[in-house]
């Protein structure tokens, strides 16, 4: 089946300057930037620990990303009960032809059908470019969940199908049911849950991998050096920031910072570059609340760590990852 085309494919390097690079999105033939903008924080819920998140600032950040050449944005129905989708929709008004819009849903087939209609209304669009299963719904066959996505595709409400937080077995079931273009796992220096099984499967099936939390919610940007630094929001539940783990992470961050400085880069830029060097990774999702954070993250593109530097950080991060409980997500949550 040929995926419906909802609008013109995004204009590369449109409007202003561009510092990002581009690669192919799965088997679609489309060019996407090697950084994807994540819109979780724009939903406000769970992210109010430091200072209020203002919609106007979120919109400025989204538009600055478009100006810089980032041409896809990831949001979800669950980000502030649709608030993030509404902010994204407002930000891309008049620029729809420059951007691929991605969102996510989870649940039974009936819920998935209901959620897409809310998504389209929230963003003010007729079709979502990439629609992803946010988490596998427990007790619902993966084939049924993916089958509902196929029905949305055939109805012209979505273009491409993706999955998120799927295990190897769940990926295998998904690809047996439909063409899956993307996989969105948690992945960074310290969280390596799917490195040895899901990433090879995605390479085999030409599935683009768009990992979230490449900076471990600011830990790999050097923002949190001790437990007291961690805001009382979603990050306070991050397993990487727990006493006894955070201290080990900080030591690795300090070494990564030394490597970054040797390249004339920031530690956040080095963490993004490290992620991009990992085999199978297509485009890390960067969660920028402000244009200044975006500017820093953009510097993670266009250079590489030395091979020995990459391996050193990879090995140090793997030691920490091996200590973690990977049976649920980074915040100790799993769908019921």
Image (tube, rainbow, N blue to C red):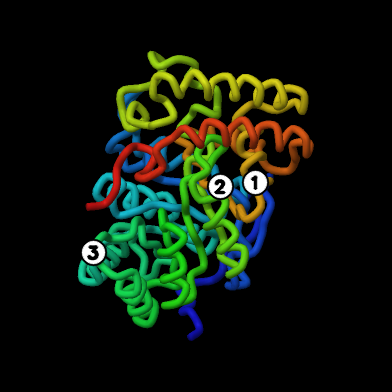
Q: Label 3 crowding class (10 Å Cα cut-off): few <14, some 14-19, many 20+?
A: few
**Residue beneath disc 2:** 284
**Residue contact at pointers 2 and 1, CB within 8 angstroms:** yes
**Residue beneath disc 1:** 276
**Residue sitting at x 41%, y 71%:** 173
Instruction: For marks 1 and 3, give the CA distance.
Output: 35 Å
Instruction: For marks 3 and 2, give the CA distance.
Output: 30 Å
Secondary element type, mark 2: loop
Could you say which is closer to the camera, residue 71 or residue 113? 113
Please tell me whether residue 31 is drawn above or below residue 152 in the rendered image.
Answer: above
Could you say which is closer to the camera, residue 79 or residue 95? 79
**Residue beneath disc 3:** 139
Secondary element type, mark 1: helix
Say which of marks 1 and 3 sits in front. Answer: 3
Please tell me whether residue 157 is drawn above or below residue 278 in the rendered image.
Answer: below
**Residue contact at pointers 1 and 3, CB within 8 angstroms:** no
> Residue 115's quadrant in the figure?
bottom left
Q: Label 1 crowding class (10 Å Cα cut-off): few <14, some 14-19, many 20+?
A: many
**Residue contact at pointers 3 and 2, CB within 8 angstroms:** no
Q: Position of residue 233 (x, y in %)?
A: 31, 28
Please state if 106 lies on the left or on the right of 269 as rendered: left
> Residue 53's quadrant in the figure?
top left
């Amino acid at each position: 089946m040929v995926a419906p085309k909802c609008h013109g494919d995004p204009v590369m390097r449109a409007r202003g300057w561009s510092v990002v690079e581009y690669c192919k999105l799965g088997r679609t033939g489309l060019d996407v930037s090697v950084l994807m903008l994540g819109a979780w924080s724009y939903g406000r819920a769970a992210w109010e620990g430091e200072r209020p998140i203002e919609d106007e600032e979120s919109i400025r950040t989204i538009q600055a990303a478009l100006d810089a050449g980032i041409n896809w944005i990831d949001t979800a129905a669950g980000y502030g009960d649709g608030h993030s989708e509404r902010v994204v929709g407002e930000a891309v008004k008049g620029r729809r032809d420059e951007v691929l819009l991605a969102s996510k849903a989870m649940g039974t087939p009936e819920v998935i059908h209901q959620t897409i209609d809310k998504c389209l209304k929230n963003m003010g669009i007729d079709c979502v470019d990439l629609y992803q299963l946010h988490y596998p719904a427990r007790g619902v066959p993966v084939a049924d969940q993916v089958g509902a996505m196929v029905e949305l595709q055939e109805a012209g409400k979505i273009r491409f199908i993706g999955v998120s937080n799927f295990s190897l077995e769940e990926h295998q079931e998904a690809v047996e049911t439909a063409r899956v273009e993307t996989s969105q796992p948690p992945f960074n220096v310290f969280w390596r849950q799917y490195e040895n099984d899901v990433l090879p499967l995605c390479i085999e099936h030409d599935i683009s991998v768009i990992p979230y939390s490449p900076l471990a919610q600011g830990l790999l940007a050097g923002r949190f050096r001790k437990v007291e630094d961690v805001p009382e929001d979603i990050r306070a539940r991050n397993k990487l920031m727990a006493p006894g783990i955070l201290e080990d992470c900080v030591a690795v961050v300090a070494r990564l910072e030394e490597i970054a400085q040797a390249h004339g880069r920031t530690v956040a830029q080095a963490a993004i570059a490290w992620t991009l060097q990992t085999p199978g990774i297509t485009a890390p999702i960067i969660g920028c609340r402000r244009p200044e954070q975006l500017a820093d993250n953009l510097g993670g593109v266009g250079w590489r760590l030395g091979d020995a530097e990459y391996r050193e950080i990879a090995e140090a991060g793997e030691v920490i990852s091996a200590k973690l409980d990977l049976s649920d997500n980074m915040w100790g949550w799993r769908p019921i």
